[in-house]
Amino acid sequence: MPTSQKNHSDSTALPNDLKAEQALGLIGLGLMQKMSQEGNPALDWSIEDHGEKADLLALRQRLEITSLAIETGAPLSTSEVSQLLGARPGSTKTQRGGLTARRISRNVWKLSRSENDQAHWRN
C-alpha cells in the first residue's frame, strides 16, 4: 500500500529562494528595529510618526510677513524671497503657491499675488 504524504502549510516558514538583496534587506530591517528597541527610536524609519506637530507659530509669522510684503510692495532680497516662497527663485519671474516674485534689479525682488487666470494647478 502506498504511503500517503501529508501536506504541511507552515505560514511562518521563509521561502528558500530569497535573493541576496532581499535577504540583506530583511537583515537590515531587523537590525534597525533592534536598535530602536534599545533606546534610539530616531533610527527606526520603519514606524510612521503620527505625533509630528507643525510649527504653527513660524507658519503664522511667515504668512503675516508675506502679506505685509505684498501690501507694502517693499523690496526684498533674494534670501528673503527664498524664505517666504519656500524655494529660491530661478528666473526673473517666479510663481509658487499663488505668489509671484519679480526681480526688479540684482538682489531686489517684489512680491505680489498671482493672477487667477495665470495660476496653473496640477493634481
Image (cartoon, rainbow, N blue to C red):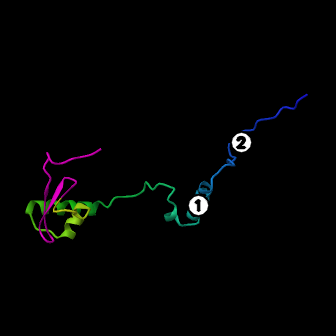
What is the C-alpha distance between the residues marked 1 and 2? 24 Å
Q: Which residues are magenta?
A: 94-123
Quadrant in the picture for the N terminus: top right
Residue 108 horizontal/vertical position (percent): 13, 69
**Is the residue marked by circle 1 packed among few (<14), some (14-19), or many (20+) residues within 10 Å?**
few
Earlier along the polypeptide chain: callout 1 or callout 2?
2
The residue singled out by tag 1 in the image is: 28
Residue 80 horizontal/vertical position (percent): 20, 68
Residue type pointed to by label 2: Asp
Residue 103 is drawn in which quadrant? bottom left
For this rendering, which residue is in front, 20 or 102? 20
- Residue 98 magenta-drawn? yes
Indicate the secondary structure of the residue bearing disc 1. helix
Residue 110 horizontal/vertical position (percent): 12, 63
Numbered badge on residue 47: none
Relative to 57, does residue 11 appear above or below in the rendering? above
Q: Which residue is pictured at 15% across the width and 48% down the height?
A: 118
Q: Is residue 48 left or right of residue 15?
A: left
For this rendering, which residue is in front, 92 or 88? 92
Residue type pointed to by label 1: Gly
